[in-house]
Image (cartoon, rainbow, N blue to C red):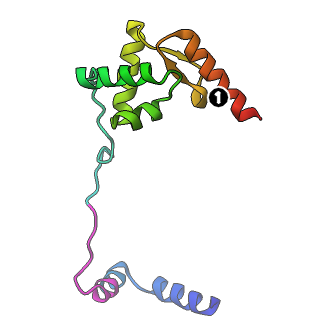
Amino acid sequence: MNNIKAEIADLIRSKTDDEIFAMISDSCHGGLVTKPVDPQGTRNQRVVRPSEPKAPSGNSYSLVYKAVDGLPGTTITTVSDMTSLPRSEVKKAIAALKDEGKVFQHGERRYTRYATSPTQAERASKLAQNAVKK
């Protein structure tokens, strides 16, 4: 294999640039296709525009509140499944409900629980932590 590599390298070194280009373009029946060069390098950069967070619609807002009120100590995933709303919309609705003081959060990450009273949220979060530690 090394002999073949050496022979190819010697062949290429013995040719001029025009001869090498002609060999390659002959083997590519349709010719060579190249991508245009962007001198500034900005072609693949994404433009980020600031946007205002959208408030959840009144219908989803009330659905999320009813789900949290009906099942204290719930998670965003559970509320999303119950209401058939996307998780992103449930998150926005819960954030708005928390700001208004209608829903309370306790715990972090996988132990985060939501309820309509702070004691229910705390109790549910602690139960979730204890259930995992066994």
Q: Which residues are magenta?
A: 23-35
Circle 1: element type:
helix
Most foreground residue, 12 or 109: 109
3 horizontally vs 15: left or right: right
The answer to if 24 sits in the magenta stretch is yes
- The residue lying at 51 percent from left, 88 percent from top is 8
Place of residue 73 in the rendered image (x, y in percent of width and height, measured from the top left): 53, 22
Residue 53 appears in the rendering: no
7 horizontally vs 76: left or right: right
- The residue lying at 37 percent from left, 32 percent from top is 88
Most foreground residue, 113 or 4: 113
Residue, far front:
70
Image position of 22 with respect to 100: above or below: below
**Counting other residues with Cα less than 10 Å from the Cα at mark 1, is it few (<14), some (14-19), or many (20 or more)?**
some
Question: At label 1, which amino acid type do we have?
Answer: Ala
Image position of 26 with respect to 38: above or below: below
